[in-house]
Amino acid sequence: MSNFVDYVKIHCTSGHGGAGSAHLRREKYIPKGGPDGGDGGRGGHVIMKGNAQEWTLLPLRYTRHVKAENGQNGGKNQLTGRYGKDEIIEVPLGTVAKNEKGEILGEILTDHQEIILMKGGMGGLGNEHFKTSTNQTPRYAQPGLPGEEGYITFELKILADVGLVGFPNAGKSTLLSAVSAAKPKIADYAFTTLTPNLGIVNYRNYKSFVMADIPGIIEGAAEGKGLGHRFLRHIERNSILLFLIPADADNHYEQYQILLKELENFNDELILKRKIISISKADLLDDELKKEIKKEFTSGEELLFFSAVSGEGLMELKDALWKELN
């Protein structure tokens, strides 16, 4: 079973508010003590909290129900009931919470950031609030308000500086392993990478940036073919998209256009992201073949050639990425 989980759905319930008290003060030497009922306590909230130490929703995978504590009822002597305990759901940075209608309730971008997903019900007022000149001893109080209930979906979108975009076997995992300490699974068949992999890329003068190896795109991915939306949503959060077209592709420009089309079909805002086009496996090419590939890109797009195996062009690729990031 994979340790990377990027989608969970949990039934959540916030706490009900406690009822106000309708207590009447009765003491030996105070024959007309009057109302002294306290307010009920607020029910507990359901809260999403950012945790920079987490990188997957795996801890929530088998969580089916989350229920915050109810508020306590009010008491005599104007005692307010205790607030219900909040239920806190810790999630990785980049997590988006949605309700059953698909509306976004909030997204976590920083460590310890908290977002209330479901508010606890307000506590009811005690009878002391209802005392008037014409009603000195009200014998009623408010009930607490109910909490909220429903399913909440949590989606993790990888936060990375550079996202690798390409067809299966374009060399994304090989590149990540060559420029970082990440050890993604690499093999000679489609969809070796089934879940995103992150790596810290070391750069000049002790600088660094984060690169994400995202499962390969296939034609029709935006309609759900292959791994579909599962990987496309991770690309939404990347600052720069690095397109990898393998040197041994039949038509390099056509492959690039297909990749662009899939991104646009999923979310047309992805086309506005900064893009760098690279030709991987450049150790298979001589200077003449590189010129022929450049001619395919009739719109004049700049191409970067590299080989993760031989190391050719890797430093130039890092330089281009760093320049674009800054």
Image (tube, rainbow, N blue to C red):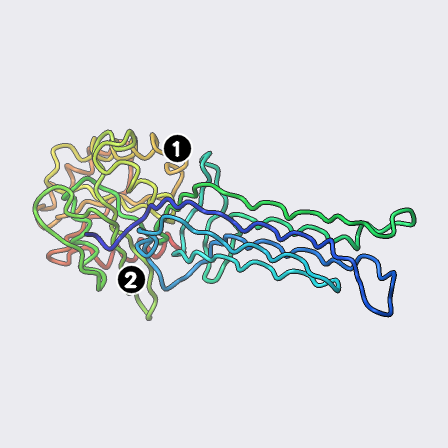
Which label sits on residue 200?
Answer: 2
The quadrant of the image that shows the C terminus is bottom left
Pick whichever, 215 or 200, lies toward us.
Answer: 215
Task: Name the residue located 70 percent from the left edge and 47 percent from the top edge.
Answer: 142
Q: Is residue 234 found left or right of 107 in the rendered image? A: left
Q: Residues within 10 Å of mark 1 (few under 14, many from 20)?
A: few
Would residue 253 be visible to someone looking at this image?
no
Residue type at mark 2 is Ile
- Residues 182 and 66: in front is 66
Q: x%, y% of residue 130?
A: 81, 49
Q: Where, by quadrant of the figure, is residue 243 drawn?
A: top left
Determine the residue located farthest toward the right in the rendered image. 133
Left or right placement of residue 44 versus residue 226 in this view: right
User: Hey, what amino acid is under mark 1?
Assistant: Asp
Pointer 1 residue: 268
Farthest front residue? 28
Q: How many marks?
A: 2
Residue beneath the point at 15% across and 58% down: 311
Q: What numbered label is drawn on residue 321?
A: none
Residue 220: % across, % down? 24, 29
Residue at the spot x=67%, y=58% of the render?
Answer: 74
